[in-house]
Amino acid sequence: MAYVIAEPCIGVKDTACVNVCPVDCIHPRQDESDFANSPQLYIDPDTCIDCGACVPECPVSAIFPLEDVPDQWHQYIEMNADAYKLSPDEYLAKWNTRGMKE
Ligand code: SF4
């Protein structure tokens, strides 16, 4: 199962993790059009191979194996998956109103 990027990434988007991911499953990259507007980076759970290489690269310790996501950040499991399943507008509509309250 995948790794998950949680709240500490918001507003940081360091991208060191992007550069070490062997399967390019952390987005948006800096050269992608949605980078500026994305609040954080997300891991595609269907592509992540669970290697853990991204974890030590994160300067704000935002990346967790699924089973270790802290309770207060559990919504980020769904948020990372939704970032790949929903359109940007659908994602913002869902999580701007709901995610921050959970
Ligand atoms: Fe990429 Fe490995 Fe991190 Fe998954 S655990 S996002 S495959 S670097």
Image (tube, rainbow, N blue to C red):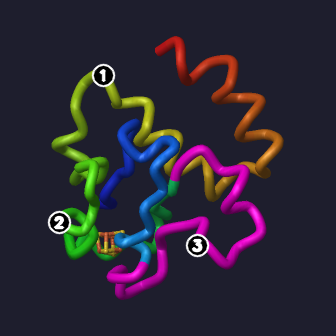
Element type at mark 2: helix
| Residue assigned mark 2 | 56
Farthest right residue?
Answer: 89
- Determine which of the numbered discs, if any, sits on residue 72 in the image: 1
Element type at mark 3: loop
Q: Is residue 23 magenta?
A: yes
Residue appearing at x 22%, y 53% in the figure:
65
Secondary structure mostly seen in the magenta stretch: loop
Q: Position of residue 74 (x, y in %)?
A: 35, 30
Amino acid at pointer 3: Arg
Q: In the rendered view, does 38 fall on the left or right side of 66?
A: right
Farthest bottom residue?
Answer: 22
Distance from Cα at disc 2 to Cα at disc 1: 21 Å
Tag 3–tag 2 contact (CB < 8 Å): no
Mark 3 and mark 2 lie on one chain; the one further toward the N terminus is: 3
Q: Position of residue 33 (x, y in %)?
A: 77, 69
Residue appearing at x 40%, y 36% in the figure:
7
The quadrant of the rendered image in which ligand 1 is seen is bottom left
Residue appearing at x 47%, y 67% in the figure:
46
| Residue assigned mark 3 | 29
Residue 33 higher or lower than 93, as above or below? below
Under 8 Å from ligand 1: the CB of mark 2?
no
Mark 3, residues whose alpha carbon is within 10 Å: few (<14), some, or many (≥20)? some
Question: Residue 54, located in which quarter of the rendered image?
Answer: bottom left
